Every structure is written in structure tokens, then in C-alpha cells.
Amino acid sequence: MRVLAAMSGGVDSAVAAARAVEAGHEVVGVHLALSTAPGALRSGSRGCCSREDADDARRVADLLGIPFYVWDFAEKFKEDVIDEFVAAYAAGETPNPCLSCNEKIKFSALAERAVALGFDALATGHYARLEDGVLRRAVDADKDQSYVLAVLDHEQLSRAMFPVGDTAKPQIREEAERRGLAVADKPDSYDICFIPSGDTRAFLGAKIGIRTGSVVDSATGDVLGEHEGVHGFTIGQRKGLGIEAPAADGQPRYVTSIDPDSGTVTVGGAEELEVWSITSNKAIWTSGVTPDGPVECLVQVRAHGGLAPAIATPVDGVDGPEMRIELREPLRGVARGQAAVLYLADEVNGDQVIGCGRITGTGV
């Protein structure tokens, strides 16, 4: 097969490309330039898309003996990922930009260009497994990225390859060293790639500006503090609330709701975070076939954690497919804008992704 290998400059995508070459595929490497003003150097483990990353990817491609290109997707990344991320926070939501990047950049815009150029598949360094078109969790549970890949539909998955998903991360580094790849010890990127400082609140504040509001106690209605914008909060947050005095009962307070129109951030006790139902839009069923009725499943609402048994039911929404999820156990800290990813409720196949939706609301 002709395989386009997306090479970020990190160790995972480097080994993924090497394995694709070793498997006998005709491989071409491509690095995506996603920043309109790429820095020359990374900030340790923070950030990505620097000129250093592009150079690291090129050196790996040279060692593997494959053609290598840098494609400029900066403007599309800004529009479809960064701008959407900012708008979601301004609306009181908590988005995961990795899902948007996978959905709209890597496995949409990039994959479409790959197909147009005659490639059969797109290989990436994501930690997940594909078996006969079925998306499964990675062998390395700590590195599993099936959650952020669940937004891919059946057609997109049919053109994807995840060569490192069957191996634990320490062994990937060992393999990179054996292959003589200079990125074997390169630190992993973490946090949000386009916020190298790691200060999401400051990044959003610079984009959105000051939009003052009140922090209100859910039980008494008392104003406990003021804030400079709802973008600084997410459901379940405990620290950085700007509360000027302890609550009446002396117990910790958590963000329980966010009203972007009035600027009101409501805080309450931990028990108020529990939800028993979730509604979501943009529903995707990984097999390409919408179930006829309710499905027993495990639902995950955050990239790491937030897992509970549930029943998911397809719903025909006004603006497209939706799903309603009834939880068998309550979850806490479920925020609008996050993804609800469904896995099979099966002891043998419980690592299999079956669907995904974007959370629009919760209920008790």
C-alpha cells in the first residue's frame, strides 16, 4: 500500500513510520505546520509544531530513506481548532482540542489530500488499535488515545493506521533507540499543543478579554466573589474560584454550572456535581450503522477517567444525529463541550469503541 505517515517530530510517529516501512509499504512522510508563527525551539515537554519538530521529523525520514514534505495547515488549524476552542470556552463549554484536530485536520483535511494524491492509508503515532475496522483501546492503558479518536467515522477509520497501539510506550522508546532514531529520548508533549506556556486561562483571556461576572453559592444565592470571564472555569473545578470567604457550611465549593450570558458561575458541594443522564449531538456510530434501539455500554466523558456503565439511545435531532445516555452510576464533573465516548459493555470486548457524541447537557 501507499502510506502517508504523519510525522510530528516525536518518537511515537517516528516508530509508526518505521514500522510502516518495515511492513513493506511505500511510505512518504509529512509534517504538518500548524502554527502561523512557529518557534525555533520547544519549551521542554510543552508545545509542538516548532521548526525543531519539523527538523526532527525530517532527520527520521532521511534515516528511513523515505520522501519527506512539510505541508502548511496553519490557517485551517487556526480556524477549525484554535478559534473553535476559544469560542467554546467563551460559551461556557469545556472542549478537547485534540478531538477537533483529529476530526477536522488529521483525518479529514490531511486524509482527503492523501487520498487525492493516491495514498491508500494515513499512519499516525496515536496509541490505539484497529482490528478489522474496529477501533480499540491501546495496549498501554496509560497512553491510550482511543477517546480522542472516537470522533472518526467508519470511512475515516478505514483509511487509518495506528502502528504503535499494540506496544507499551517504554518499548516504543527502546525500539526507537535500536533503530537509531535520535528522537528516542525526546520528551512527550502534553497539555494543549498551541498553548506552550500551559496557562490556558491566560491564553483565553488574551483572546476573549475581560467579561466580568459573579461567583454565586448555589445553596444561599450569596455572591462569593467576582471573576473576569467564564472562560476561566469548567464544571467540577475547585481551585482558582476567586472566592473571597468560606461558604456558609465551611465545605469546599466546586463549579456546578456556568451561564455565559449573565456571566454567573455557580458553585456548590461535591454532591451537586453528580449527573445521571447525558444528552449529546454530532453522534457518530463507529460501525457506520446506527443501532435500532438502546445499547448497553460504558461511557467515558474525559480523556482520562470519567467512566461508567450506561445505556445509550440514538435520537433523531433537528440538526443531525444525537444520543441520550442514561447512567447506571453517577458521574461527576461532566461538562458541555466534552465528548461522551461509548465502549462495549463486554468483559472480553470492553476496549472496543462503538460511538461518540458531543455533550450538550446533563441531568440528575
Image (cartoon, rainbow, N blue to C red):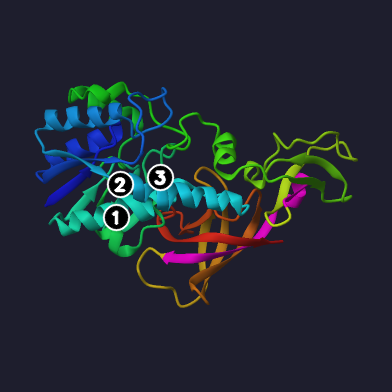
Q: Is residue 303 left or right of residue 174?
A: right
Q: Where's residue 90, x and y in %?
A: 60, 50
Specify the quadrant of the image occupied by residue 176. top left
- Viewer-side residue, 208 vs 51: 208
Q: Where's residue 259, x and y in %?
A: 70, 55
* Amino acid residing under circle 1: Ala
Specify the principal SS of the magenta part.
strand
Q: Is residue 268 visible?
A: no
* Amino acid residing under circle 3: Gln
Q: Is residue 87 visible?
A: yes
Specify the quadrant of the image occupied by residue 245. top right
Quadrant where the C terminus lies?
bottom right
Specify the quadrant of the image occupied by residue 42. top left
Circle 3 or circle 1, nearest the eye: 1
Badge 3 vs badge 1, beta-carbon distance below 8 Å = no
* Residue under pointer 1: 109
Q: Where's residue 279, x and y in %?
A: 59, 65
Query: Cα distance, mark 2 to mark 3?
Result: 22 Å
* Residue under pointer 3: 145
Numbered disc 2: secondary structure: loop
Circle 1 or circle 2, nearest the eye: 2
Q: Is residue 114 left or right of residue 261?
A: left
* Amino acid residing under circle 2: Phe
- Viewer-side residue, 285 vs 359: 359
* Residue under pointer 2: 73
Mark closer to the chain start, 1 or 2: 2
Query: Cα distance, mark 1 to mark 2?
Result: 9 Å
Badge 1 vs badge 2, beta-carbon distance below 8 Å = yes
For mark 3, does the 10 Å Cα neighbourhood hold few (<14), some (14 to 19), or many (20 or more) residues? many
